[in-house]
Amino acid sequence: MHVISRKVLRDFGELNPEARKALEAWFSIMEKTSFHSFADLRRCFNSVDKVGDYCVFNIGGNKFRLVAAVHFNRQKVFIRSILTHQHYDHWSA
């Protein structure tokens, strides 16, 4: 999968250093793996949820949420936002 954009991950990691390793691990898995359906994604990330048109990943032991649009047919992942658990509670798809 091609993740767009890694800069979002780096910027969030700079503001939240405790999330950096977990975000790097997520990125590494996403870049090295081809997912063809949400079921494929769920087999790898068992806590990912579908919320509207987005996939929401728990990052760093559920301390952070990564919201992304995953286009399986194009093998692209567009990161919409990365939020703390507290900010996610106020987010809407």
Image (tube, rainbow, N blue to C red):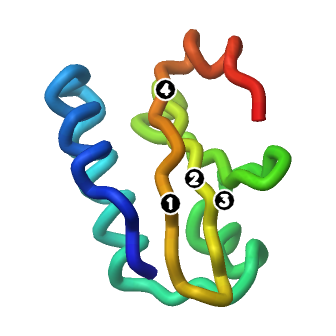
Along the polypeptide, which appears first: circle 3 or circle 2?
Answer: 3
Front one among 60 and 85: 85
The image shows residue 15, relative to residue 25, as above or below, that is: above
Tell me how far mark 1 sits from mark 3, CA to CA. 20 Å
Q: Of the numbered discs in the image, which one, if any, rests on residue 78?
A: 1
Q: Is residue 6 above or below residue 88?
A: below
Residue furthest to the right: 52
Residue 90, percent from left and from top: 69, 12
Q: Distance between the residues labelled 4 and 3?
A: 19 Å
Of residues 39 and 87, the one drawn nearer to the viewer in this rendering: 87
* Sequence-first tag of 4 and 2: 2
Which of pointers 4 and 3 lies earlier in the amino acid sequence?
3
Residue 66 horizontal side relative to residue 9, left or right: right
Foreground disc of the pair 4, 3: 4
Label 4, label 2: how far apart the Cα atoms are: 11 Å
Mark carried by residue 58: none
- In the rendered view, does 11 fall on the left or right side of 37? left
* Amino acid on which the number 2 mark rests in the picture: Ala
Callout 4, which amino acid? Leu
- Mark 1 or mark 3: whose residue is earlier in sequence: 3
The kind of secondary structure element at disc 2 is strand
Q: Which percent across, then down, holds residue 10?
A: 19, 43
* Circles 3 and 2: CB atoms closer than 8 Å: no
Q: Distance between the residues labelled 3 and 2?
A: 16 Å
Give the mark, 1 or 4, whose residue is nearer the N terminus.
1
Q: What element carries label 1?
A: strand
